Amino acid sequence: MARAMEVTRLASALRAADIAHPAHGLDDAGAAGVFDLGAQVRDVHVDVVGVAYVFGGIL
């Protein structure tokens, strides 16, 4: 669970950094890629937590 929280914080930090510094050299596609990465990390977090919940109930 701690690892999942770290992943969530990483995704939040990536989004916050992109919002706070829009002129960091990325074009619109690059910025969209950062947001997409954040969405992918969030999706993985949801999957990991769901699997941990299922296996936690079994074990």
Image: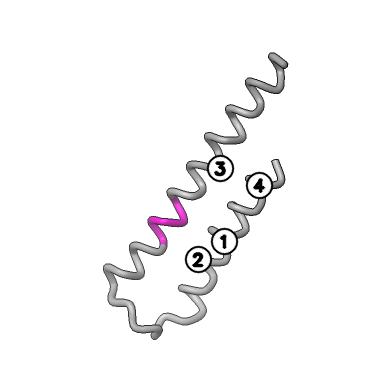
Label 2: element kind: helix
Q: What's drawn in magenta, residue-wise?
A: 35-39
Q: Quadrant of the C terminus?
A: top right
Give the CA separation, mark 4 to mark 3: 9 Å
- In what element is the residue under mark 4? helix
Residue displayed at 41% across by 61% down: 35
How far across and down, in percent of the image, does residue 57 sit?
71, 17
Image position of 23 (left or right of 49):
left
Position of residue 23 in the picture relative to residue 12 (left or right):
left
Callouts 2 and 3 close, C-beta under 8 Å: no
Cβ–Cβ under 8 Å for marks 2 and 1: yes
Q: Which mark is residue 45?
A: 3
Q: Is residue 46 above or below residue 33?
A: above
Mark 1 or mark 4: whose residue is earlier in sequence: 4
Sequence-wise first label, 4 or 3: 4
Tell me the amino acid under the disc marked 3. Answer: His
**Label 1 is placed on what type of residue?**
Ser
Q: Are marks 4 and 3 in contact (CB under 8 Å)?
A: no
Q: CA distance from mark 2 to mark 3?
A: 16 Å
For mark 4, what is the residue?
3
Residue beneath label 1, please?
12
Image height of 59 relative to 24, above or below: above
